[in-house]
Image (spheres, rainbow, N blue to C red):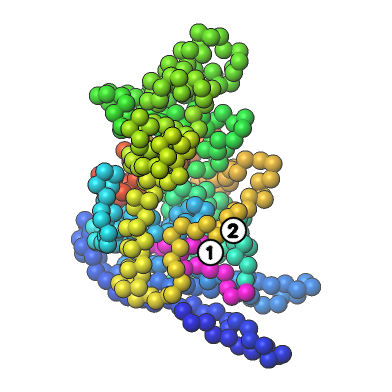
Amino acid sequence: MAATTDENEQGTAKPAEPVDDLVSTHHTITTTGGELSYTATTGRIVLREEVVTDGKFDGLKAKAEVHLTSYVADGDEPRPVTFAFNGGPGSSSVWLHLGVLGPRRVVSGDAGSLAAPPYGLTDNAETLLAHSDLVFIDPVSTGYSRAVDGGEPADFHGYQRDVESVGEVIRLWTSRNGRWLSPKYLAGESYGTLRAAALAEHLQEKHGLYLNGLMLISSVLDMGTIRFTDGNDLPHWLYLPTYAAIAHHHGKHGDRPLRDVLAEAESFAAGDYALALARGARLSAEERADIVRRTAALTGLSEDYVDRANLRIEHLRFFTELLRADRRTVGRMDGRFVGWEPDAAGERFTDDPSVSGILGAYSAGINHYLREELGYANDLPYALLSDRVRPWSYKEFEGASVSVVDKLGTAMRTNPHLRVHVAAGYSDGATPYFAAEHVLARLPIPEALRRNIEVRYYAAGHMMYVHEPSRVQQSEHLAEFVRSEQ
């Protein structure tokens, strides 16, 4: 989009005051529940911040232009509204938007049967729009969202400012569209689940905006459960059931049912394996050999490799090692995907085949869809996944693990009507399902509120909706979650 300028008192050019550039179009879709007419609105809204100088209110200053896409069903009947975003940090909302929730979806194919360029879009008959209006938000520096001309993008590249800016988008949209009395939900994926949990508390405390539910897809609420840092054994045993699930998919467990393999892996991981890691050199040679043997059998790795790794299997090493004999790697986001490396002896893969395998389809889909179907033209590149947000600031957690478990607990205790849906993929090597279970079990809430939490499991990985049976199943689960409020 062309930039315009004004002149200041010295006659030098300065950026013009930004304005919203939303466009609306009208559509009809046939869902599993029948025909639905709706209005789609997309574009960028300007975020402004109150400025106080020397104790005096100095007006509102534009800070960022945030891209969003909303879908509102036609008619006067009151409806819920769901605000959705992905994670990263640095991810746009394209994955939830065109993967599972929105009225149109990408045809990407799946592991072993990926679609070929130039890809395509199709109607999503299972869209959550049949049950809830939808608002997809791209945080600053993702999608078409940017800091204003002359602004500092890094101001938004951190935990607290991210929560505040996304929270302001939610407040603005709710107010401008008269939806304060609508049931309200947040749907986040990956880091978006950490953002959603923090937002639940932030919106309550900052704006008195209480939510009805959180949809946490591929959940990570405590980074300590997934970060393989020196001295932290927690991820090693929380990842082990996921390693077993991926090994099962690739034939390492013969014809054993997956559920049997996972039951054994979960019991071993939280029991003898976790204890063995804690005991370290206090293990006898016989005890260590037994742990090596059982770990290798469950993960599909060789006993020699497990022994040389000192019983501790770092996740990127696992994805590179599991199928090394076949000169293949497996995906981190979804271990069902396989890829090749230029160096078959490498320590860690250089490409995640479960990301690169679908990235082209989602990129083509969103760039075509926004411009050609929704009528929004912007010459900025749509940033699906942006490295510009790095380094991401966690200064609020200096000296501590990055965790919002306490904030979710506070939100649920303060608002006992807040319900939580957690979606977990067995083949998800980014946010393992057993880590999500571990965190949920430690939420600081009274027993009476645990009935507000539900967990659903899928055969696929992080973006479980690329697997067609999982997509259909997940769509129904999310619809049930929203319908149950009504």
Residue at numbered disc 1:
140
Horizontally, residue 115 falls left or right of residue 486, namely left
Image coordinates for residue 87, horizontal then vertical, percent: 48, 53
Residue closest to the eye, 252 or 31:
252
- For disc 1, the neighbor class at 10 Å (few under 14, some 14 to 19, many from 20) is many
Identify residue type, mark 1.
Val
Identify residue type, mark 2.
His
Q: Secondary structure at mark 1?
A: loop
Q: Which residues are magenta?
A: 129-150
Horizontally, residue 348 falls left or right of residue 38, namely right
Query: Between marks 1 and 2, how big is the CA–CA gap?
Result: 8 Å
Identify the residue at image location x=60%, y=65%: 153
Q: Secondary structure at mark 2?
A: loop
Check residue 157 in the rendering and tell me which mark sits there, or answer none: 2
Identify the residue at image location x=57%, y=45%: 404
Instruction: Say which quadrant the C terminus sits in.
Output: bottom left
Image coordinates for residue 193, horizontal then vertical, percent: 48, 48
- For disc 2, the neighbor class at 10 Å (few under 14, some 14 to 19, many from 20) is many
Q: Looking at this rendering, what residue extends furthest in the right direction?
A: 54
Q: Is residue 307 magenta?
A: no
The image shows residue 29, relative to residue 396, as above or below, that is below
Check residue 203 in the rendering and tell me which mark sits there, or answer none: none
Identify the residue at image location x=60%, y=88%: 6
Residue closest to the eye, 82 or 469:
469
Residue closest to the eye, 314 or 440:
314
